[in-house]
Amino acid sequence: MRTIVAYLASSMGDVDGTQFLKLSSAIFYGLSSFLITVVNKTVLTSYRFPSFLVLSLGQLTASIIVLFVAKRLGIVKYPDFSLDIARRIFPLPLIYLGNMMFGLGGTQALSLPMFAALRRFSILMTMLLELVVLGIRPTFSVKVSVFAMIGGAILAAVDDLSFNLHGYLYVMITNALSAANGVYMKKKLDTADMGKYGLMYYNSLFMMLPAIMGTWLVGDLDRAWQYEGWGDPLFATQFLLSCVMGFILTYSIILCTQHNSALTTTIVGCLKNISVTYIGMFISGDYVFSLLNAIGLNISIAGSLLYTYVTFRKKSSSSSEGSTADKERLLPASGRIDNV
């Protein structure tokens, strides 16, 4: 960790504008991801709010309202509504909604340390999808760090004393959707001519009605309505904060993906779990300690640190490994991606 911090501090003195955007967008996403994870866990576990689906509706609503008002005020710009927009950004809305809902479900069902560890499977999925969809080949050092994270997560899961099958299932679905979201977000940012604000707004807008219907059909709207904690100002504040943080997180994901690679965005999201893992052992109240589990968590964390060093270290132009320009490394090879 000290090596990474030293690198970031020393490099800030001579980085150009592009490198600054890469670093700052990655840090912004990491902080946003950490804060929303803690707030969501507090709302769903500490306050025992009965429905992660209703919480996801709140996050969708906040994104729609904030972006609609911002466009009216001239703060942001994105295309006006047309029926062609749905075709241009598909399948992002479906991926976006599923990622949000199953992610909240996993947060509610699992302890934060295990949730953080299992989320690292999304890294391997993202790396494979980047190879297939974007034509990006990871270096050997990236592969080593990714497999260290995955191996540690598997070791931790072997001795998870608070095992929850539904939670594991939710997280693995979220991992697949996160990988697809990162890769296809990069693709749409490059080809759909929507801009990051347009993708955020229309992803939320198109999925709002299906999300409401699904939540109503499973009875979660009634359960949330009957929840007795609405009168608690502290709970209400954290619920609203979670909704707004959902918008901020989505913006930070798109910003980080735009200036970096989908794999980098995924890893930064997992890197923040270093703090989530250790803090979650004390604040969530549902983590059960075991030696093997703790060893696995720390191996996975070490892999995250290794990847961060490999990705953000200053690359020498004379180095044979990693000498590929950022644009060549982050964008698909010519002809690999069609405009859909």
Image (cartoon, rainbow, N blue to C red):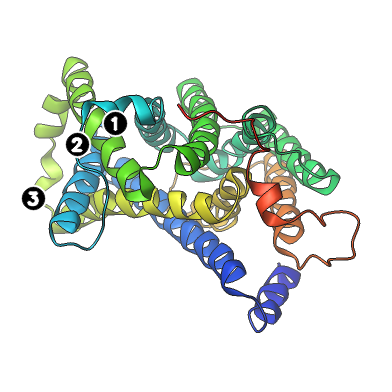
Among the two numbered marks 2 and 3 on one chain, the one whose residue lies closer to the N terminus: 2
Label at residue 81: 2
* Marks 1,2: beta carbons within 8 A: yes
Residue 218 image-quadrant placement: top left
Among the two numbered marks 1 and 3 on one chain, the one whose residue lies closer to the N terminus: 1
Residue 242, image x and y in percent?
28, 50
7 vs 274, nearest the viewer: 7
58 vs 25, nearest the viewer: 25
Under mark 1, the amino acid is: Ile
For the view shown, which residue lies furthest in the bottom direction? 13
> Dot 2: within a 10 Å radius of its alpha carbon, few (fewer than 14), some, or many (20 or more) residues?
few
Q: Nearer the viewer, mark 2 or mark 3?
A: 2
The residue drawn where x is 66% and y is 73% is 8
218 vs 235, nearest the viewer: 218
For the view shown, which residue lies furthest in the front direction? 335
The residue drawn where x is 37% and y is 29% is 88
On-image quarter of the C terminus? top left
266 vs 301, nearest the viewer: 266
Label 3 residue SS: helix
Disc 3 marks which residue? 231
Residue 308, image x and y in percent?
69, 57
Residue 131, image x and y in percent?
70, 32
Disc 1 marks which residue? 85
The Cα atoms of the two marked residues, 1 and 2, are separated by 7 Å
Under mark 3, the amino acid is: Gly
- With 16 as the anchor, is 242 left or right in this view? left
Label 1 residue SS: helix
The Cα atoms of the two marked residues, 1 and 3, are separated by 40 Å
The Cα atoms of the two marked residues, 2 and 3, are separated by 38 Å
Confirm whether residue 94 shows in the render. yes
- With 7 as the anchor, is 139 left or right in this view? right
